[in-house]
Image (cartoon, grey):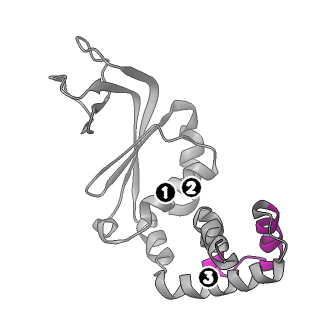
Amino acid sequence: MRSIAKLVEEFVDTHPYIKEALIAGIINYSELARQIAKTLKITKTEAIIVALRRYRAKLKSITPHYSKKIIDICKKSKIEIKTAVYVYILPKYQKISNNVLAKIDGLNHTTIVSEDKLENIRPIKVQENLIAFIIISPKEIEETPGVIHFMTSILSERGINIYQLLSCYNETIFILKKEDLVNALSAFDRIMK
């Protein structure tokens, strides 16, 4: 049987927002302990509180804090939008001769992002009425852990689904639904001011 400390660590590790709040020191230990106890069916909330405090100390010692640098990178970034974007999922070895915005070869499939409606292809799936929400960041993005995590969390907190995510040097390209454009711009505007 696993110890309460191990169970608590596993719980925190599978809940990234709780983990971030724990590291930042903004967690109400008693309330979180009650929630964990209820979820994991553990009766010893005091032991959970002790485990949380110890795990926070452990996480703080091994987790570098990059939030200021991440915010600085976001503030220096610019946004570009491409509307009327199509995403095509193709079998791996189907050839494409058209001009495309992005092409990614996975193990079994190829994803094409295009501003044009492609003809003479046999896609497995086509996604229409999308936009390319492109964030052009300073070159420091390459060496700063957590920037993409931060950007995706901004979108997910607003209920925005990311259909595709592409990264090319300092460009982070989110493929989103057209109706999410204003919400996405609003979310990033608050960060980039």
Q: Please state which of residues 119 and 78 is positioned toward the viewer in this rendering.
A: 119
Looking at the rendering, in which quadrant would you find the N terminus? bottom right
Circle on res. 55 = 3
Residue at (64% x, 87% y) in the render: 54
Dot 2 or dot 3, earlier in sequence: 3
Circle on res. 151 = 1
* Picture layout, residue 155 above or below residue 131: below
Crowding at mark 2 (Cα within 10 Å: few <14, some 14-19, many 20+): some
Q: Are marks 2 and 3 in contact (CB under 8 Å)?
A: no
Q: How many marks?
A: 3
Q: Please state which of residues 117 and 81 is positioned toward the viewer in this rendering.
A: 117
Circle on res. 154 = 2
Q: Which residues make up the magenta segment?
A: 21-38
Q: CA distance from mark 1 to mark 3?
A: 26 Å
Give the dominant element type of the magenta stretch: helix, strand or loop: helix
Residue at (70% x, 76% y) in the render: 4
Dot 1 or dot 3, earlier in sequence: 3
Q: Is residue 36 left or right of residue 6?
A: right
Q: CA distance from mark 2 to mark 3?
A: 26 Å
Quarter of the view holding residue 33 = bottom right
* Picture layout, residue 137 above or below residue 117: below
Q: Please state which of residues 152 and 22 is positioned toward the viewer in this rendering.
A: 22
Q: Magenta segment: does it hold 33?
A: yes
Quarter of the view holding residue 143 = bottom left
Secondary structure category for the residue under label 3: helix
Residue type of the residue flagged with mark 1 = Met
Residue at (58% x, 59% y) in the render: 190
Q: Magenta segment: does it hold 45?
A: no
Q: Are marks 1 and 2 in contact (CB under 8 Å)?
A: yes
Percent position of residue 185, x then y:
54, 47
Q: Please state which of residues 125 and 3 is positioned toward the viewer in this rendering.
A: 3
